[in-house]
Image (cartoon, rainbow, N blue to C red):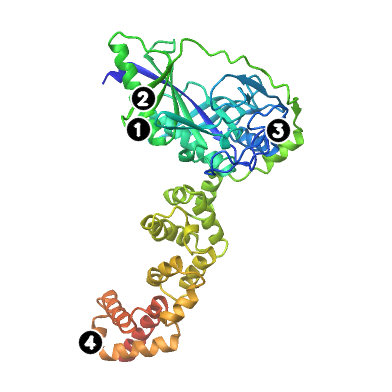
Amino acid sequence: MIFKNFEIVIGIENHVELKTKSKMFGYGPVVYGAEPNTKVSEVDMGYPGALPSVNKKGVKLAILAANALNMEIDALLRFDRKNYYYPDLVKGYQITQQFHPIGRNGELTITLSDNTKKNITIERMHIEEDTAKQIHKNDTTFIDYNRSGVGLIEIVTNPIISSAEEAIAYVEKLREILLYLGVSDVKMNEGSLRCDVNISVRPFGCNKLGTKVEIKNLNSLSNVKKAIDFEVERQTKLYMAGKNVDMETRRFDETLQETVSMRKKSNSVDYKYFREPNIMPIRLDDNWIEYIISNSPETADIKRYRYQKEYGLKFDETNSILQNMSIMSFFEQTISLTTNYTKVANLIITDIQAYLNKNNFETISDTYLLPENLAELINLVDDGLISSKHIKTILPIILESDSVTPKKIIENLKIKLISDPNEIKKMIMIVINENLDLLTQYDNRPERVLKTIMGILMKNTQGNINPDITQKILVEQINEILEKQK
């Protein structure tokens, strides 16, 4: 395979939409999917005399992200103008942080499929505003300014990533960190996490970087992998044929399943950056920064450790719970009401997730199931009032019915376990008296005798008898009878 002769060099730029109610430098609301051009303000539209102001929440979220990525945080907040003309940039410039990014020199540790770890160093992270959205239909381009001015952080790695697997692992880990911090909802399909990948290849042993090609706006992890794999093969084949790789910007065409050229780059674009004159430098209070960091939400890694150490969950169970924020939240609400943590996790991962998949539901909130009802159901099993098999009957009803509780369902279906020792003892004696020949086999095959009698009891009660109490009383009664026969 020709790739073995070449080293892959990848750097990633992620644009992350900040989870704020209003835009970064204006008061226009941030709403995904709203009617085009209905969520804008004078600042977003670049009206003369409309002055920007800095969104405090956006700065707070940027600080949380910078701290989680082990970055040096610049307490002097300064903004610049990036000047260029494009239809989606109504002002003719973008407010950004070219010269003084809020975060520098960070790192993020990824874990690969063979359990090896690698530190991905991060060059910088800066705050900026988003552009409008272009919608292309036939020969016409429509522009929706609802997205114009939405707060972003751009996170730029060093060219240290060397495979598609590492790139995927990095984006996945970055997404998890930002999601659990509440920095962004990081939905790639909605554009709140966008990925630009810079790729070059060079012969092994060569210190000089190859010609960089940028792949813009990859909107899924699957496309990140496909784009990298295709582009590495394309560039490698060009070098092997003695041809040059052009410096250019490309995009991934999902229909063709390959990257296609958007525009050539002869050299770096001169954006004529200068300091934003309408936003004076802001000195962030050190105590405020420290307060934000010390009150940072619990990260997924901390939860992962706690779930395994405190709750006794397995690694795979933990990851299944943490894959979805709504499921994680439901899990934590439920375990505050029951101590059977593993049973909660097991039901969420198996029965409940299967129900969600079957009905194409994204979250448990799409059902009628409440944390208190699931906890009650599990506690009823633990208290011996119903058996585990009854969960299969009760859970689907709770998922689909409003204003019902496990106890009401148990009463309606008459499936409460028989747990009264005196009643169980009477039932056992009836079965023993009808099967006295079984007792002659007890000394040699006790397990078979117990299993046979338990099976008869389960059949007689349609499974509605407490197995633990029954087993204990059964052993006592058999031993008592055999002792009297001696």
Residues under labels 2 and 3: Cα distance?
38 Å
Earlier residue among tags 4 and 2: 2
Q: Would you name the residue on which mark 2 appears?
A: 259
Amino acid type at image mark 3: Val
Residues under labels 4 and 3: Cα distance?
87 Å
Residues under labels 1 and 4: Cα distance?
73 Å
Residue 315 at x, y percent in the picture: 44, 48
> Could you say whether the residue bearing mark 3 is in a helix, strand or loop?
loop
Amino acid type at image mark 2: Thr
Q: Is residue 482 left or right of residue 296?
A: left
Q: At 35% from the left edge and 9% from the top edge, which residue is drawn?
A: 244
Residue 398 at x, y percent in the picture: 45, 68
Q: Which disc is residue 254 wearing?
A: 1
Amino acid type at image mark 4: Asp
Vertical placement of 242 versus 52: above or below?
above
Earlier residue among tags 1 and 2: 1
Q: Which disc is residue 292 wearing?
A: none
Q: Quadrant of the N terminus?
A: top left
> Could you say whether the residue bearing mark 2 is in a helix, strand or loop?
strand
Q: At 31% from the left edge and 20% from the top edge, which residue is drawn?
A: 3
- Residue situated in front as seen by the camera: 328 or 13: 13
Q: Would you name the residue on which mark 4 appears?
A: 437
Q: Are marks 1 and 2 in contact (CB under 8 Å)?
A: no
Can you tell which quarter of the image residue 211 is in?
A: top left
Q: Residue furthest front?
A: 139
Vertical placement of 267 versus 130: above or below?
above
Q: How packed is label 1: few (under 14 Cα within 10 Å), some, or many (20 or more)?
A: few
> Could you say whether the residue bearing mark 4 is in a helix, strand or loop?
helix
